[in-house]
Image: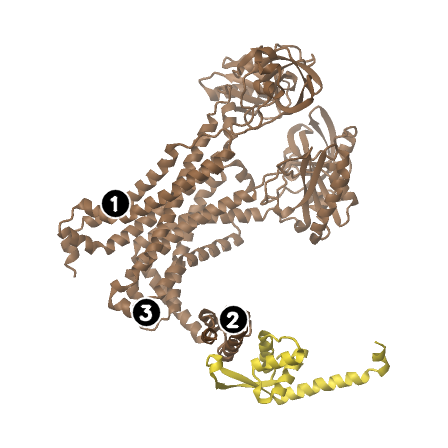
Amino acid sequence: MKGTNLGEFEEVVLLTIAALVNEAYSVAICDELEKSLGRPAKLGVVHAVLNRLEDKGFVKSKLGEATSTRGGKRKRYYTITNGGKAALIRARDLRNELWSKIPELALKKV
Amino acid sequence: MKNTTKAHPPRWATKVLRWYCRRELLEDLEGDLHEYFTRNVQQHGAGRARLIYIIDVLKFFRPYTIQRPGFLKLLTHWIMLGSYIRTSGRSIARNKLFSVINIAGLAISMSVGLLIIAMMSDLLSYDRFHQKHDRIYRVISQYEYNGKKDEDIQATTSLKAAKAIKESFPGVEDVAILKRDFGGDVTADETTIPLSGFWANDSFFKVFSFQLLQGNARTALKEPFTIVLTEKSAHKLFGHTDVLGKVVKMRQGEHERAYTISGLMKDIPVFSHIKFEILGSLSTREVTEAGNDREMAWDNVWGTWAYVLLEDKRAAPAFVKNLVRLSEKEDKSAKLTHIALDLQPLDDIVTGRNLSNPIGQTMGATVMWIFSAMAFIVILCAGLNYTNLSIARSIRRSREVGIRKTIGAQKSHVVNQFLVESLIISMLALVAGFGLFLLIKPHFLSIESSLRELLVLDFTPRLVLMFVLFAIIVGLAAGIFPAIFFSRINAVQALKNLSAIPMLKGVTVRQALIVFQYSVSIIAISTTLIMHKQYRHFIAYDLGFTTENILNIRLQGNKPELLKKALLELPEVMGVSQSLMITSIGEFYGTLMKNPKEPQDSAGVHFNAIDEHYLPLHDHKLLAGENFKGRGSKAPESEVIVNEQVLKRFDIAERKPEKAIGEIVTVEGQDLTIIGVMKDFQYGRANNRSGNTVIMRYAPEQAQYLNVKILSSDWPETYEKIESIWKQFDKVHPLEARFYDEQIQAGFDGLKASMKVGSFVAFLVIAIASIGLLGMVVYSTETRIREVSIRKVFGATELRLLYLLSKGFLVLVIIAACFSLPVTYLVFDRVLLPELANHAPLGLFEMSAGVISVIAIALLMIGSQTVKVIGTNPAEVLKVE
């Protein structure tokens, strides 16, 4: 059984899928990531991450309608599952908790 | 814009993607790539977009995208495998001619391939038994004097450099130092035997993994006058190996010294490039050579091998910089001299480039490349036969393929079937080739003496595995082209109409292959003939003096006088002379000479030190003056005989021999009077350019050899007599006597060996090409048998038919000749032979004999088959229809 922890890039991708709602398929996710990260997101990387997220049960996917733009090939749309949502919340909570532990002065000095 | 909308991603890349990608991932991934492709077309243009697409397809080849072979698919292939093997077996059994030609051809070529593999495997296992082999480096030097760099790089370095590296360099764990010429006649108790080896320092057993059976590895070679024996030497000397602490005496030249045995080591592994019988402690030399300032001279780079054990092998490049700094510092100690130092990894010593002053036999990368290239060409020729013949007989197999395809075989099944067939043939060839390999192995090893010393060619499981792997590769390579060819056959066409099969499609390719094979054959045979001519030319070369019936006996430290007297008493012995060395066999002795009239001009000359009988015995011609007169050996050297080249080089007496008599020259600081001028002769080997200026010095006391002129009708008996005389004088060393002519021949053993290898390869290539051609002729005449019959019915003469059938093949062979002859001629005439001094010119015979014989063999092959076809009764052929 694979671990169910969420890597940093995985988290970003998962958030993007959630943000795109019904339009989350690989190319769109790449474009959105590029916009928010400010650097190009490689399809190869994203594709591998999507595959892994699906393996971990954080997203599920289904094929959409065929269009002419993609050589007649259908898109695979991703939607976030309950497990994915829980993982995101867990990740945010962990962060908040860590943030709250930092005394205000400690960061000001840096 | 029009172009961009029509642009398609490369179809083959999509095919690749579809081939490897898992079904469930394929569709959207293909879509994604397509979407990016359209985007890239607009941004970067179609060409760039295609490139990106291809790269992306290759980049997506990852563990999670690759489809696992489906169970069903796998099962079909398994079930079919049995069928493939069965049908292949049947096909091999049915087409006996095809099978025999291919198995024989492949077996012959494979035996050579196996030989090379076994050789490589041997060579690559050299020195790997040292545990730290990857961290050991040898220091090598290049000598430069007065701005003139030596062409050769020395495997040796100076003792000074070796010690400096050991003492003062960072990153060095240890340095093993070996120095040449330790050995002599060793006496223990009653036995005296000659043993030879090296001086070695106490780091020897720390750097190398030679196993010490008795004694302490750290201290064994520390003290002066200590030695280490190998088990074998200890057995020879004592008869047992319990020798630690025993004292032996060793006579080395003039000196006899006592040494204590401080260690006994296991015999040296076969695959060690360093071989010896005995080691003496290097610290001994600090005592014995105390007054010798050459011992630690920076420019004395010819006698010491230094093996550096680095702490970290990655530090080697940085280490070389330290060596450069060392050279800069030490160059000042030797006038006009620069010594460049470098490192050579231990693992490269046997297989790397050839260095001067090697410590033991090496093979050298060039020879390995040549051998591998020849093996490759031979295997290529045999592989081409297979490919060629498979396609040539496609007419017979295409119906089979058609039926297979009709009942559901896919392309991949047909490919597999034909690959299985070629694999079975290559495995059968491996078995036959292995037998041949065993047959030629001893012959190969005896080609040259160095091969026997270097190689064992024994079997290891690894070697067997490599053989099988090799056969698989050969089988696949030979079979892949026919397999693809057959898999493309259209089933409907194949079943409907045989003649519609695109048999002719491969014709030009096949013709090109035949031309290639025959070109290789002709080049191989002409090369061999040319080498043969050079060899004959060199061993019969007129050296300028007589070598006939002269037996050279090495004195091995014995005093010549008594031996000489005893030999002269034999009736067969016509005369005996003494000499320091044997000329014309590759030995060189050099010294510096000056013309006192031009003190600025000094030059190296070669010399031989002889007695008064030497020149007449060898029929050296004196142009002026006279021979040496016998005198007591105590008298100082005062006379010299020079050759014409010396007069030319030093411009003595207007270069006139008569006038030169009485002139004075200075050799090694002594003034010598020229008493004779001799005709020029070949001092080096016949193929050597250097050694033109030669002087003869009178020094019988320096003699190393006796030159015995023998006139005998019963040579074995004479030899026995000489041997029994020898035994009276020297009980330790066996007689070393060889005829001069044999020694000269031995100097060209290298050429002889390449000649042997060349003729063997030529034979193989011609044999393979011939049986290949035979197969081709058989199939093509078979397909034309009906045509021949009809022509015969209409009254064609047999000669006309013969011409018709053989024309096509003959033209190919002639094209091959037209191509290969000029190539061979130019390569030898312009490139290779000019490198060889005093070579024989290229003759018409060597150039034409090869072509004529190859064409004759080809004619025989073609003729025998065509005559058979022409002889058939047309009625029998035509009534079938």
Which quarter of the rendered picture does the C terminus of chain A lie within? bottom right
Secondary element at image label 3: helix
The residue singled out by tag 2 in the image is B45
Check the image and report above or below for A18 versus B84.
below
Does the rendering let one see residue B389?
A: yes
Residue nearest the observer in this picture, B811 or B799: B811
User: Which amino acid lies under the numbered mark 2 shown in the image of this protein?
Assistant: Gly
Residue drawn at 19 percent across, 46 percent down = B800
Residue under numbered circle 3: B404
Q: Quadrant of the N terminus of chain A?
A: bottom right
**In 3D space, how far apart are the residues under numbered discs 1 and 2 (Cα atoms)?**
61 Å
On residue B508, which mark appears? none
CB-based contact (under 8 Å), mark 2 and mark 3? no
**Distance between the alpha carbons at the discs numbered 2 and 3:** 45 Å
**Chain designation of label 3:** B
Chain to which mark 2 belongs: B
Chain identifier matching the yellow colour in the rendered picture: A
Compared with B106, B19 (above or below) is below
The answer to which of B716 and B437 lies nearer the viewer is B437
Assign a secondary structure to mark 1. Answer: helix
**From the viewer's perspective, is the residue at label 1 or at label 2 nearer?**
2
| Chain rendered brown | B
Confirm or deny contact between disc 3 and disc 1 (CB under 8 A): no
